[in-house]
């Protein structure tokens, strides 16, 4: 099924307000991930980082060293 943009817009314009509202919500949900999806992505990122640390691919730096470096750089 192929529909032209003009035809689709005309169809949408003829819809009742409550249906338009539902359609808008549906479209917006496809543009912006939900918090649940965002949380899932962050969990995957955390797992990836833990694996990199465990495999030795990434070296961690103790917090004390990080804070000392920040102080050294910005307290001039």
Image (cartoon, rainbow, N blue to C red):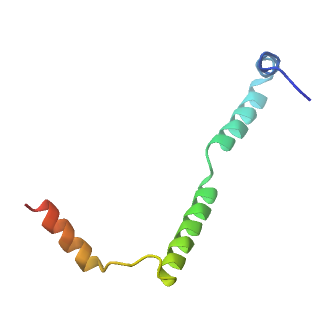
Does residue 34 appear to the left or right of 67 in the view shown?
right
Q: Quadrant location of residue 36?
A: bottom right
User: Which residue is at 24% across, 77% downward?
Assistant: 65
The residue nearer to you, when weighing 31 against 18, is 31
Relative height, residue 66 to residue 5 (above, below) = below
Q: Position of residue 22 (x, y in %)?
A: 74, 35
Q: Quadrant location of residue 58?
A: bottom left
User: Which residue is at 56% across, 74% downward?
Assistant: 47
Q: Position of residue 53 (x, y in %)?
A: 47, 79
Q: Exactly how many numbered labels are in the figure?
A: 0
Q: Position of residue 75 (x, y in %)?
A: 10, 62
Relative height, residue 58 to residue 5 (above, below) = below
Relative height, residue 57 to residue 33 (above, below) = below
Q: Quadrant location of residue 21?
A: top right
Does residue 56 appear to the left or right of 47 in the view shown?
left
User: Which residue is at 92% across, 29% downward?
Assistant: 1
Does residue 30 appear to the left or right of 46 in the view shown?
right
Of the 4 image quadrants, the one containing the C terminus is bottom left
Considering every residue shown, the one lying at the far right of the view is 1
The residue nearer to you, when weighing 53 against 25, is 53
Q: Position of residue 60 (x, y in %)?
A: 37, 78
User: Which residue is at 57% across, 68% downward?
Assistant: 43
Considering every residue shown, the one lying at the far left of the view is 76
Relative height, residue 45 to residue 5 (above, below) = below
Considering every residue shown, the one lying at the far front of the view is 57
């Amino acid at each position: 099924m192929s529909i032209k943009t003009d035809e689709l817009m005309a169809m949408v314009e003829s819809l009742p307000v409550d249906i338009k509202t539902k359609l808008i919500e549906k479209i917006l949900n496809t543009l912006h991930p939900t918090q649940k999806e965002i949380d899932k992505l962050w969990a995957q990122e955390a797992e990836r980082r833990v694996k990199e640390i465990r495999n030795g691919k990434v070296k961690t730096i103790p917090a004390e060293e990080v804070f000392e470096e920040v102080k050294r750089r910005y307290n001039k």
